Amino acid sequence: MDTGTQAAATQQPKVVPGPIALPVNAIYTNGFKAGLTSGDVFVVLERNGTDLAVLNMSYTTAKTLAQALEALIQGLEITSKQKIMTAEYIGQLLASPPPPPPNPGPTPP
């Protein structure tokens, strides 16, 4: 691997805001299912449990996308000093019984 290729391979993904070629479909998703085949990766986008669209991509594109998303979220967490909760974590919180209310002490006679 030459030094130019090596340098490009070790750089963090960058998101450069810019114009989007219109028309383009905009999809809001609040869930997903992901899987892979022998040749590619697929992501089923969901909204409120209903399948909306399927994204198919190469392994390379999927890994690059995962790295870019991770970098974006880590940047937000560092800037906001707040950890972003995952859907799995929130599901565990909701499945746990709530803590008992504080004991106010004995009731006076």
Image (spheres, rainbow, N blue to C red):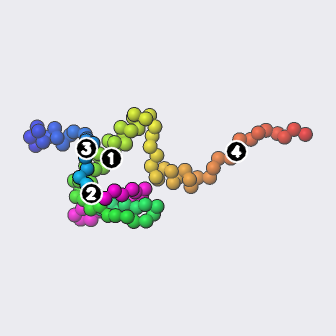
Disc 3 on helix, strand or loop? loop
Q: Report the magenta residues as a range.
A: 23-41
Pointer 1 residue: 69
Q: CA distance from mark 2 to mark 1?
A: 24 Å
Left of 104 or right of it: where is 34? left
Pointer 2 residue: 23
Residue drawn at point x = 34 percent, y = 56 percent: 26
Residue drawn at point x = 25 percent, y = 50 percent: 20
Q: Nearer the viewer, mark 2 or mark 3?
A: 2
Indicate whether residue 12 is drawn in magenta: no
Pointer 3 residue: 18
Q: CA distance from mark 4 to mark 3?
A: 51 Å
**Viewer-side residue, 95 vs 57:** 57
Verify CB contact (< 8 Å) between mark 4 and mark 3.
no
Q: CA distance from mark 4 to mark 1?
A: 39 Å
Q: CA distance from mark 2 to mark 3?
A: 15 Å
**Where is residue 29 drawn, in percent x and y?**
40, 57
Pointer 4 residue: 101
Q: Most prominent secondary structure in the magenta stretch?
A: loop
Left of 74 or right of it: where is 61? left
Mark 1, Cα crowd under 10 Å, few <14 / some 14-19 / many 20+, is some
Disc 4 on helix, strand or loop? loop
Left of 8 or right of it: where is 19? right
> From the image, which quarter does the C terminus lie in?
top right
